[in-house]
Structures are given as structure tokens and as C-alpha cells.
């Protein structure tokens, strides 16, 4: 999936674009709108926590670092004479999994409190009243959707394509 970014001047334009995207068979769960706090969004699909915060990258970092830390702890345990009563592989594996789970959990709590770095370039425009629309599409539809928005709404400013988005938000 690829994420397309558009800056839209107002809620009316954003609603029209969402309607056209739905007619073009873009699922509503793939459309996310970020607006200044207090902006009446109506029926617009508001961006969730995964889109507005650093949640997903934080979980990925925590999973990796926790897994490595757990693996190292497992290697230390089996290196201590007499400590490895059960299979050494089971100790290392279980500590790696436990470390990854704890790391993902702890880092997710931190990630939800941090704004997404991908939204920082748009903060000023959002504060000025524009809406940021993020549309997740398959790579073969990127040009089609960009052309659809550009042709129907020249006031919508295309802001680029994110080459890779997480598969599970």
C-alpha cells in the first residue's frame, strides 16, 4: 500500500473528495483526515491514533530492541553454570519472545503520546485551517487516484506519496 497526501482547503471540499474516492472504490477505512482541533468534521473519516501518533514505528522499535535484549539475557542465563536447568534453546527463545512483547508494550505507551513525524511538515497548514487527507491505495492505483483528485479538485494540493505504510493499522 502507498499513502497519498493532499492538503484540502475546507471541509466541503474534503467531503466531496471523500465521496469521489468512495465511488472510485477506495474503502472508507483507507481514507484518513486530520484537521485543526475543534473543526467540525461532519461525516469525514477522521484519522485514528495509528495515523496521528508515532504508535506503529514505536511498536516496531520496541519489538526489535526488546527481542534483542531478551536474547542477550537468555544467552547470559545459559552462560552461568548451573542456571540452565531446562533446554538452553528454550530459555533463549522464551526470553527473546518475552523481551519483544515487553518492549513493544512499553514503546507503544510512549508512541501514542508522540505526534507522528510524518505529519510535522503539515502542522502549520493544519493550524491555518486546511485539512490533511491521507489516502491508502495499492501501488497500481496511485496515479489513477492522484489524477482523479487533481482533475475534480484543483484546489486540493497533492503533497506526495509515502512509499511504504504499515500493513496492519
Image (tube, rainbow, N blue to C red):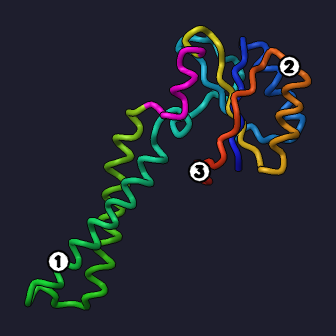
Residue 84 is left or right of residue 147, and the answer is left
**Front in this rendered view, residue 165 or 55:** 165
Residue at 40% over, 40% down: 111
- Look at the image and tell me whether residue 31 can be seen: no
Q: Is residue 56 above or below residue 21?
A: below
Q: Earlier in the sequence, mark 3 or mark 2?
A: 2
3 and 2 marks in contact (CB < 8 Å): no
Secondary structure, mark 2, is loop
What residue is shown with label 2?
A: 153
Q: Is residue 119 magenta?
A: yes
Q: Earlier in the sequence, mark 3 or mark 1?
A: 1
How far apart are labels 2 and 1 at the CA level?
61 Å
Q: Is residue 103 magenta?
A: no
What residue is shown with label 3?
A: 166
Picture coordinates of residue 46, whole percent (x, y): 63, 28
What residue is shown with label 1?
A: 76
Residue at 90% over, 22% down: 152
Residue 107 is left or right of residue 83, and the answer is right
Residue 148 is left or right of residue 112, and the answer is right
Q: Is residue 76 above or below residue 162?
A: below
Task: Decide: few, some or many residues near mark 3? Use Cα within 10 Å; few <14, some 14-19, many ≥20.
Answer: few
- Residue extent of the magenta highlight: 115-125
How far apart are labels 3 and 2 at the CA level?
28 Å
Quarter occupied by residue 43? top right
Secondary structure, mark 3, is loop
Amino acid at each position: 500500500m502507498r499513502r497519498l497526501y493532499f492538503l484540502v482547503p475546507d471541509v466541503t471540499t474534503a467531503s466531496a473528495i471523500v465521496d469521489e474516492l468512495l465511488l472510485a472504490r477506495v474503502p472508507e477505512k483507507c481514507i484518513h483526515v486530520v484537521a485543526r482541533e475543534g473543526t467540525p468534521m461532519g461525516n469525514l473519516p477522521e484519522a485514528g491514533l495509528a495515523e496521528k501518533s508515532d504508535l506503529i514505528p514505536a511498536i516496531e522499535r520496541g519489538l526489535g530492541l526488546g527481542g534483542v535484549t531478551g536474547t542477550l539475557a537468555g544467552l547470559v542465563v545459559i552462560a552461568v553454570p548451573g542456571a540452565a536447568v531446562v533446554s538452553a534453546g528454550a530459555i533463549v527463545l522464551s526470553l527473546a519472545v518475552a523481551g519483544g512483547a515487553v518492549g513493544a508494550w512499553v514503546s507503544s505507551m510512549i508512541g501514542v503520546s508522540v505526534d507522528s513525524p510524518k505529519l510535522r511538515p503539515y502542522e502549520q497548514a493544519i493550524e491555518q485551517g486546511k485539512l490533511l487527507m491521507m489516502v491508502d491505495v495499492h501501488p497500481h492505483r496511485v496515479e489513477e487516484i492522484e489524477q482523479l483528485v487533481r482533475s475534480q479538485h484543483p484546489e486540493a494540493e497533492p503533497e506526495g506519496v509515502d512509499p511504504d505504510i504499515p500493513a496492519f493499522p
